[in-house]
Each structure stands twice: as structure tokens, then as C-alpha cells.
Image (cartoon, coloured by chain):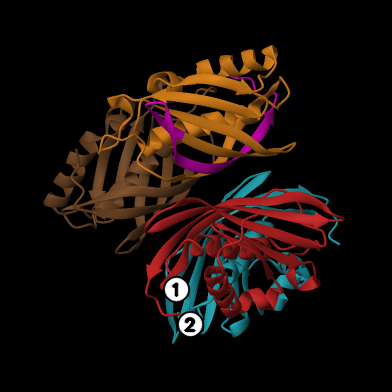
Chain colours: A red, B cyan, C brown, D orange
């Protein structure tokens, strides 16, 4: 997989580190390519639903961030990204050692960008697609992050 | 607002307590009515995105649980609920003292139930609609929770 | 129900008449209020799916147009509207004398507007909610319609 | 592209021919593979929106049918398919000689099947992705078509 250039990687990592939720869940950025970002979430009781599987909210949270950063890799340095909306199907019970959420830009536009979202559960080296979705993002210019 | 009967309330609370993610985020069940559930999430750095607002993933997590439990209040005692899919629009930056997610059953079916999801940010007693969505749930019979 | 002012009504009707699909389906604009539009579709074999019910595509088409025009009523005179995306649940078999699609603005923004979509089947004076959805629209300025 | 076996093809074609909407729009089934169906829609004034592009409703209608039949190819002979919900992003103005809607099964289940939907506009031999979506379908057993 292609890596994004180092300036973009630094920008994405800096923003990711400001997302309190990602740290709190235990999520990690594992790949930053142009228009393609992976985020992993290890299994632990703090991210489960009532049957012990990963909670749809945890699955969605990393998928949302993966898509947002995939879009962000294609934006100018002084711009910012906000999620307009997303839709996600939970395809199978999400269990395993960790989840791997993949955000991939499907259509990049000046104002709006659309990403495809996929989340795989990884157990014993085997990947199972457990969620798939689609997300719309908006580019906001010159929005100082705080 | 109507309260669900006490057996249903106990069933919902017991299941909610098994959702590791809800406890980890700091979310609280604040209303359990027939087909209508509220979940609140206080503001804290652990649930933010990069600009300091509530993360779309946190907003979605409590909306998903609120909808799931709203459906669950209408199910027989030995059944269980799984999210099939949901779609959510983030309508405004989510900031304030806490979020109030409301899941309301729009159509209850034997197999599938559809909920409307709304999330309000509450600041200084004022409520702002910050997210709205729609969710499809499936009833699973006799699934032992673990 | 409030009526939109006459200039807005004329603008909506003129645009609706340019939608070849609406005429071809037999759809009619039946209410134009500020942020609220109704479109009706009479039952006929040309709008059915394989079981004789209204086709999800017909249901969605009038819901999409109702939402688009609901947003359009709130826009300046020289602007135009495009659908960014929508999501719709088909809640029940759609059968009856006609469908009544209701598009209602949930959040109006400078760039993006979000609508709630509902479609009722009407049979013997009784209304049944057969579809519900949510739609994101974008305002495009000074786009000459052709 | 693989073709579905002849019994499945005959079953899909017979059901498609009962969809009054598809004939009325002028849509044609152009490929029936296992879990993969294409439907084409030629450009004509009867399927346009107010700017002369294909109407989002027309685009969605053929996408919905393509996904429904993609699922249907994997079902037993005496079962039927209904759309539970779909979500679609309109990525670019849809113009050209015809649209090619592709429904592809992403996850086949006993009760629910999820499809990925893509619609391409074809002009001068060039294909442009103009819409992308995701759809949930339910299998209904022994439902006599009428």
C-alpha cells in the first residue's frame, strides 16, 4: 500500500492525537496512504456490547475516523474535515483480537468527499468483513483546530 | 413520558450494564419507556474529536444503543436485539455539558424494527439537535447473552 | 398547513414541471409550504414492482423530489438544489389508491440542508406510513437551469 | 463476467418483467450473474430532473432493482425478495447515453442480504461513477408473486 507523503502523515497523526475518543478506546492509526487510512482497535471489555462482541458504536467510531482521515489526506494543509453523515451495516458479530477499519475515498470533491468504509475482524490471522458503510464529509477551510 | 413496566426496565438495565462501551464512555440510561429510550453522555476529553467537540463516533454510539434498547422494550423477554444498520447525519458541532440521545421506535415488526434516532446537545439548559438518524434492528430469539 | 409565498410556489412549480420523471410517473405537487412539500403518486401498473406494490424506486423518487423541493423553498431565488444522498427504509408493502410523500426540512444550512422523508400509502381514507428516510441536499448558487 | 445458471436467469427475467416501473422507465436487464446484476437505463426526457440530468429517483430505481435481483440470484426458487432499506450518494451529475446500475452482493445471509450499489453514466464509451450506495434486503419464503 502506498504511503502518503510525510507532511500529510504528520498532519493526520497530529489530528488523530487530538481525538480524545480514539485514545480512550485504544485505537491506533496503522496506515496513512493517499485517500486510504486504516485504524485498528484491539479487543477489550471497554469496547463491547451486551453479548461480548465489539459494540456497533466502537466499530462505527473507528470507521468514521478512518474515513475522515482518508479524506483529510487529500485536503490542503490549512483545511479541516467534518463528517456530514454516514451509514453502516453491521454484517456479522464482530469478535476477534482486533478490528481493522479501512476508510477509502470513493469520490473527492472540492466541498464534499465520499468514502467507503469497511471494518474487518481479525482472529488467528483470518480477516472477516464485519461492517461496511459509506460516509459523506465536508471540507472546511482555515478552521483553526483547538 | 411513560415509563416501561418494571420487568422491562430491569431487563434493559441489565443488558445496558453488560455493554462495556457505555460504561467506558460514561454514558447513562436516563429514560426507559415503551419504544422510547434516552441515554446521556457527559462531556469530557475522552469522548472528543480533534476540535474538542463530541466525536461523531461517541454521538453515534449512544444513539445506536438508545435505538437498540427502544426496540428491546417491545420484544419478548427471551429475545435479543442486534443492529442491522444505521445512518446518522451530524447536523451541528456537538458541544455542551452533555448529549441526550433519543431512540424511538418508528415501526415495530416481528423480525425487523426501525427506529428514529435524535441526539441533542444540552448547554445551559438549552437543547440543540446535533444529530439525527435512522436505524434497522433485528430480533433474535432465545439468544443467550454471555 | 402553511403555504409558501406565491413567488416561492411559482419557482417550485416551474422546476417540478421540468422534472421529466415526475410527469412520466404521474406525480403531482400537492402542497408547497416553507420547508415542507408534499408530492402524490396515484397507483397504476407503471409504478409497480413484481408483487404489484409500488416499487421502492417510485416511492423513493417522489420522496427525493419532495425533500429537494422542501429545501428549495428556503433558498434564495437564484440558487438551485442537488441531492447529495438519501437513505430510505421501506417499512411496509406500499399499496393503496395513492402515495403521499412528505419532505420536511430538519436542518437548514448555508451549504447543506437535511430533510426528513416520509411516504404514506392512502387507501379508503386511511394513511399508512410505508417509507421513512433522511436526505442531505446541497445548495448550488446561480446555476442556470436548462 | 459469470452468468447465473439458466433456471436462475429465467426466474430473474420473469420477475423483472412483472416490475411495471422498469418497463415504464425503459430499463433493461443486461447481466445476471450469481450475486451480480446489471440494469441499464437509456437517456430520455422521461427520466430527467430539472437540469436535464437523470433524476436521482431514476438512478435509485435501477440501483434498487439491480441490488434486489443480485440477492435474488442466490435465493432458493420458491422465495422472494423485498428491499428493507437503501442509502445512495449521488456523486456527480448523471448524464450520458445510458446509465449502468450494478448490484453486487456483499454479504448473503439466511434472512438478510446486503448489496453494494454502483451506477455508472456511459457517454462516448467512457464510464463515470455517478452514484454509489448500500442496500439491505430480506428474503421472504413461499411468497406467491401476483
- Residue C100 in view here: no
Q: Position of residue C101 (x, y in %)?
A: 37, 42
Q: Residue at x 26, y 34 (%)?
A: D52
- Say left or right for B39 vs B131: right
Q: Position of residue B25 (x, y in %)?
A: 66, 77
Stretch of the chain drawn in magenta: D120-146
> Which of the image's four quarters has the C terminus of chain C?
top left
Q: Secondary structure at mark 1?
A: loop
Crowding at dot 1, Cα within 10 Å, few <14 / some 14-19 / many 20+, comes out as some
Main SS, magenta residues: strand
The disc placed on residue D1 is none
Return the residue at label 1: B93
- Which residue is at the front of the view, B75 or A6? A6
Quarter where residue A94 is shown = bottom right
**Residue A68, placed above or below residue D72:** below
Q: Position of residue B72 (x, y in %)?
A: 69, 58
The chain containing the residue under callout 2 comes to B
Quarter where residue C57 is shown = top left
Q: Residue at x 51, y 85 (%)?
A: B97
Return the residue at label 2: B96
Quarter where residue A112 is shown = bottom left
Amino acid at each position: 500500500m502506498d504511503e502518503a507523503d510525510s507532511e500529510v502523515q504528520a498532519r493526520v497523526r497530529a489530528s488523530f492525537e487530538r481525538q480524545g475518543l480514539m485514545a480512550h478506546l485504544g485505537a491506533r492509526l496503522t496506515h496513512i496512504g493517499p485517500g486510504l487510512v486504516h485504524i485498528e482497535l484491539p479487543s477489550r471489555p471497554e469496547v463491547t456490547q451486551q453479548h461480548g462482541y465489539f459494540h456497533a458504536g466502537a466499530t462505527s467510531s473507528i470507521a468514521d475516523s478512518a474515513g475522515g482521515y482518508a479524506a483529510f489526506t487529500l485536503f490542503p494543509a490549512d483545511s479541516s474535515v467534518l463528517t456530514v453523515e454516514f451509514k453502516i451495516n453491521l454484517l456479522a458479530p464482530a469478535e476477534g483480537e482486533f478490528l481493522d477499519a479501512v476508510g477509502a475515498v470513493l469520490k473527492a470533491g472540492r466541498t464534499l468527499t465520499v468514502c467507503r468504509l469497511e471494518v474487518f475482524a481479525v482472529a488467528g490471522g483470518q480477516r472477516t468483513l464485519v461492517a461496511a458503510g459509506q460516509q459523506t464529509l465536508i471540507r472546511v477551510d482555515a478552521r483553526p483546530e483547538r
